[in-house]
Image: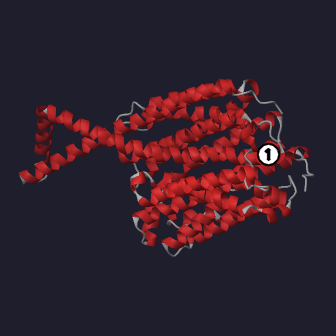
Amino acid sequence: MAQTIDPQALPDSRKFLIFGVMAFGQFMALIDIQIVAASLNEVRAGLSASSDEISWVQTAYLMAELVMIPFAAFLAQALSTRWLFALSAGLFTLASALCGLAWSIESMIAFRALQGFVGGAMVPTVFATGFAMFTGKQRAMIPAILGMVSVLAPTLGPTLGGWITDAAGWRWIFYVNILPGAAVTALALFCIRVDLPNLAMLRRIDWMHLAAMAVFLGGLEYVLEEGPRNDWFQDRAIATGAWLSFVALLLFLERSFRSENPIVNLSPFRKPTFVFACVFNLVIGFGIYSATYLVPVFLGTVRGYNAAEIGTTVFIAGVVQMLGVPIAAGLSQRLDPRIMITFGLSLFAAGLWLFSFMTPEWGFHALLWPQAVRSFAIMLCIVPSVNLALAGFEGPELRYASGLFNLMRNLGGAIGIALVNTWLQDNARLHMLRLGEALGVAGRTSGELIENLAAYARSYTPDSAEALLMAQGVAGRLVQREAMTLAFNDVFRVMAFLFLAALVLVPFCRRPKVS
């Protein structure tokens, strides 16, 4: 059935209500990942799970979400945006309640997979609906607002998760979704009327295509999540997952081109500018999620900050992002998006480069400007990349383009966190060796340091041997702290070069037509 409702003809007040409801639903789905990440130790203790088992609480969610994001375009056509979003929000709320009621690690993993799968539909649907409803200056605000939501959620998530867990217990990190989730579900049913369903599509699902996509994306996410923790392909399960994912990718591509009713339509990739925009989004996702991940890890491992102190330090990032929304939206109306994304990528690289001079003493004040520069640059990257990607698409193709584009950001984040974890571990070991060699050469200096520390330790213990061991332990921790700091600097430097390398693609993009 062809779409017979013109979303652009809706009153502005109705458009803003629809967009507000959908944007809040997207925020719920995105922030839930980081809220739970901050409380995994408490969840592990509460369910008597092992360290290996608890990692699946996050991995299962991310694998399922990644599968749903491109599938949402098909479901939006079949069910309509109204029913897809309402079902997504409602089932996400139900799955949240089930996670809070989980009685074992197995039940938690199953409910988290359900939560990620049903919640994943809200992310691309709001992008496509926003672009379908608005034009001109109003449309310029869509990528800016949704970009802020996409970045603000992982920034605030760990702090909010830690606060909820400390105040009410880990089960409430899931229960807090119930009331807002129910409200979003009811409002979605009440106000979203932008298209009509085509239920006949449900009878023509290419199940082989869907299964291939699920194995490909789920396997890829599994490899990226578990790889850094388990020595990558040295682990048999990860090697098997990678092989299955590759075979499923080949089958997915075969069905995409030869199926009469493909689950995912790859036609948006026929436009070169869309391809380049997806590459930009891959890099942007890499930078956003990796930097958002690295700063709290640095503050926790090197500085020894607790959750509240980390939240206070990274809060400036969210403030600058919100301030950058109207600026980025205004510039998108005046500047060629290619110029804007060039400036955005360059500024993001500069922000990452500022992080590469960290010392173990860096705290709120030292991190203020690097965070501010990077956070402001995020908006200047996201807004033009969304415009380059989605401008020129309409109807069903707009939905598919939105799903594929958002998939690239999530893949970029998954790849980024996996790689920076690996780089961090490798570089930390390398710097430990180099610092150990340097201390060995400068034996007199290191000996004096340990002797001074031992002398200080004797004021706490009369045992000289114990004092020496305490001194050596302190010296070892100092070396480890310096090695970790140097490793963080190396990783931020590599990320800065990656953003500069992405600038090579800008001249090949075409300026999109203004709607």
Q: Quadrant of residue 478?
A: top left
Image coordinates for residue 407, horizontal then vertical, percent: 64, 48
**Closer-to-camera residue (294/21):** 294
Q: How many marks?
A: 1
Residue 135: name its quadrant. Answer: top right
From the image, tell me which residue sits under label 1. 397
Please name whichever residue, 377 or 63, is drawn nearer the observer in this view of the structure. Answer: 63
Q: Is residue 501 above or below residue 245?
A: above
Left or right of 373? Residue 434 is: left
Q: Is residue 339 above or below residue 249?
A: above
Left or right of residue 262, residue 466 in this image: left
Q: Amino acid at mark 1?
A: Glu
Residue name at image x 35 percent, y 43 percent: 426
**In this orientation, does residue 155 appear?**
no
Residue at the (47%, 47%) spot, across then down: 418
Element at badge 1? helix
Give the answer, above or below, for where 340 lies relative to 476.
above
